[in-house]
């Protein structure tokens, strides 16, 4: 159970460790339909990849804490074999794997470039390799620090081999934290002057940030087009992390038996736009990400549950979605 950062608020809520199998860190203690499992089990990972492929999912984004098996402050170090197992399972079922580079202690623009080199050298030969790398909390690193490394092959030798996708919290982040700093009097559509190649919104809780507010998605799409960026909107089935953050009830979003999920999908900007000269321009979205498949502790999972009222509901809803 994660304490609130304000000690005055933290003392009002319980602390401790949620210990499986008697207790599970998920809303109402709900468990996977397949039972409790480890993502280090190759058979389980292969089953999950097949299930996703069967409902039309083309890729997975897997969390990773850097080449030295870093971890965040909320858990033990990640097993270095985890990413290998994910790639091996994905290869079996024609699923692509992208990396979600999580924050870790002393993460810098330079360490990210070293991570990029490691990933390209070790996984780009896999048939499951997708060269998109999503940088969670990218805005924590100052834009001028990113600027020292990302546009330069000298400092980031494998930069041209990947697409770096930045997390944004609001539309204006695109112009202040994603493209080149305004000190440049250049065309930011030129590849050498872009810091990142695209943006994503991550959060499944609608209105948690301005970027995760569907009414702002057309503006994000417009800015992404302006700067020749890809835009990955993220949708989810709901949100409830009160098992691990009991002080965060205000951000709970009811799943509404699939309605929340469908409404988020329907909010995504689509198709082409007619320009003033009569021509048509495709929007900046070429894929949609789902938060998440199995983030059980935050109640964003679409994986089949043991709950008889949900079961495989969200996996079946995915079959309805057409892009």
Image (cartoon, rainbow, N blue to C red):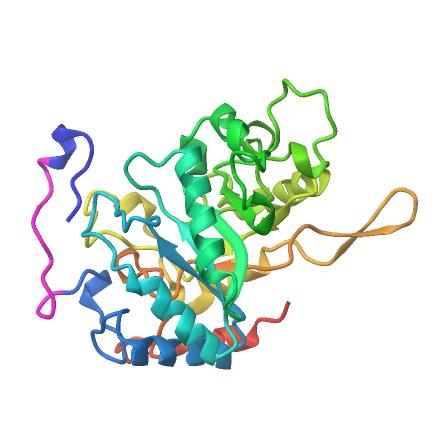
Residue 200: x and y, percent? Answer: 52, 47
Please say if 97 is above or below 56: above
Residue 170 or 96: which is nearer the viewer?
Answer: 96
Residue 179: x and y, percent? Answer: 61, 32
Q: What stretch is highlighted in magenta?
A: 11-23
Residue 206 seen? no
**Is 22 colored magenta in this rendering?**
yes
Please say if 111 is above or below 254: above
Q: Residue at x 56, y 59 (%)?
A: 288
Residue 112 or 169: which is nearer the viewer?
Answer: 112
Which residue is situated farthest in the right direction here?
Answer: 277
Residue 169 or 155: which is nearer the viewer?
Answer: 155
Q: Which residue is drawn at 72% across and 36% down?
A: 189
In the displayed structure image, the side of residue 253 where residue 129 appears, left or right:
right
Q: Residue at x 19, y 37 (%)?
A: 4
Magenta stretch: dominant SS?
A: loop
**Is 291 colored magenta in this rendering?**
no
In the displayed structure image, the side of residue 170 where residue 74 appears, left or right:
left
């Amino acid at each position: 159970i994660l304490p609130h950062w304000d000690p005055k608020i933290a003392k009002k809520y319980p602390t401790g460790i949620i210990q499986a199998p008697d207790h599970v860190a998920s809303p109402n203690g709900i468990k996977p339909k397949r039972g409790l499992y480890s993502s280090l089990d190759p058979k389980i990972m292969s089953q999950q990849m097949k299930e996703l492929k069967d409902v039309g999912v083309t890729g997975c984004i897997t969390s990773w804490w850097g080449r030295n098996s870093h971890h965040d402050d909320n858990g033990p170090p990640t097993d270095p074999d985890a990413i290998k197992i994910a790639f091996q399972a994905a290869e079996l079922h024609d699923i692509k794997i992208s990396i979600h580079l999580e924050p870790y202690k002393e993460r810098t623009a330079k360490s990210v470039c070293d991570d990029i080199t490691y990933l390209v050298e070790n996984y780009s030969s896999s048939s499951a390799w997708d060269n998109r790398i999503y940088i969670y909390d990218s805005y924590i690193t100052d834009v001028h620090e990113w600027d020292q490394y990302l546009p330069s092959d000298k400092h980031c030798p494998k930069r041209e081999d990947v697409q770096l996708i930045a997390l944004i919290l609001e539309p204006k982040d695109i112009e202040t934290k994603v493209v080149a700093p305004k000190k440049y009097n250049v065309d930011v559509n030129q590849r050498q002057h872009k810091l990142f190649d695209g943006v994503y919104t991550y959060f499944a809780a609608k209105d948690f940030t301005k970027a995760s507010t569907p009414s702002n998605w057309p503006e994000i799409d417009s800015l992404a087009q302006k700067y020749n960026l890809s835009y990955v909107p993220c949708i989810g089935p709901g949100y409830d992390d009160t098992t691990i953050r009991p002080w965060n009830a205000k951000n709970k979003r009811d799943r509404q038996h699939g309605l929340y999920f469908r409404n988020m999908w329907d909010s995504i900007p689509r198709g082409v736009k007619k320009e003033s000269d009569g021509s048509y321009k495709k929007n900046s979205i070429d894929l949609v990400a789902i938060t998440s498949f199995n983030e059980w502790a935050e109640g964003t999972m679409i994986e089949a549950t043991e709950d008889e009222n949900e079961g495989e509901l969200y996996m079946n809803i995915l079959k309805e979605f057409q892009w």
